[in-house]
Amino acid sequence: MGKQYWKPGNMLYPLPVVMASCQRAGERPNIITLAWAGTVCSDPAMVSISVRKERYSHDIIQDTGEFVLNLVTEKLVFATDFCGVRSGRDIDKFQQMHLTPLPSVQISAPGIKESPVNLECRVKDMIPLGSHDMFLGEVVGVTAEDAYIDKSGKFQLNRTGLVTYSHGEYFSLGKKLGKFGYSVKKRK
């Protein structure tokens, strides 16, 4: 079995696909689809998103210092793709995709009601990286869909039908293979 050596490129897949919502005061809210998003810290809870400088949402997030990360489900994948290939400069993505702005508790930018999880974020830092700027956001509030909270109060995130992005394609998450620590768990 051979291997080929390629020039440097981003081949770290799969990635979570999210819709980030943002809004300037007095303007309509906007949505940008991002696959370059991730967890960077647990205490305080922080995430990162990387946005191209020429994207309409870039300046909104830079100016307001806030955004909402909305997790994507199979039901939202069409809207997710649409919001990734159309510009909010030209259209109202909430209206076009029949999505509902969800008022946030801690920030001014709305979430997306149809998403099972909305992470309200305040920008702590913006790091220019080249083609993209990375926004580090502190998660200041989380909204979770009641339908996925079981009788014991546990949020069943993996039952929401989450979607991932890999090399230009969307995939629903597959079967469970194990859970954290199962490889070292003592057998009874």
Image: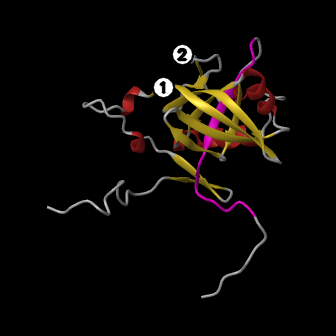
The answer to whether residue 143 of the structure is visible from this angle is yes
Mark sitting on residue 111: none
Mark closer to the chain start, 1 or 2: 2
Q: Residue at x 63, y 40 (%)?
A: 48
Q: Nearer the viewer, residue 94 or 14?
A: 14
- 52 with respect to 99 (left or right): right
The answer to which image quadrant residue 105 occupies is top right
- Label 1–label 2 contact, CB within 8 A: yes
Task: Provide the secondary structure element on which disc 1 rests.
Answer: strand
Residue 105 circle label: 2
Query: Which stretch is magenta?
Result: 9-25
Which quadrant of the figure contains the C terminus?
bottom left
Which amino acid does the dot numbered 1 rest on?
A: Thr
Which of the 4 quarters of the picture holds residue 4?
bottom right
The front one of 55 and 47 is 47
Tell which residue pokes out farthest to the bottom in this image.
Answer: 1
Residue 54 in the image, given as x and y percentages of width and height: 85, 38
Q: Quadrant of residue 49?
A: top right
Q: Which residue is mark 1?
A: 143
Give the amino acid at mark 2: Val
For residue 74, side relative to residue 92 (left or right) = left
- Where is residue 13 shown, x and y percent of the image? 61, 59
Give the CA separation, mark 1 to mark 2: 9 Å
| Residue located 55% across and 43% down the image | 39
Q: Residue at x 77, y 16 (%)?
A: 27
Please name the colour scheme applied to the rendered image.
secondary structure
Quadrant of the image containing the N terminus: bottom right
Q: Position of residue 52 (x, y in %)?
A: 80, 42
* Number of residues whose C-alpha sits closer than 10 Å to that of mark 2, classed few (under 14), some (14–19) or many (20 or more): some
Image check: 52 left or right of 176?
Answer: right
Residue 92 visible to an observer of this rendering: no
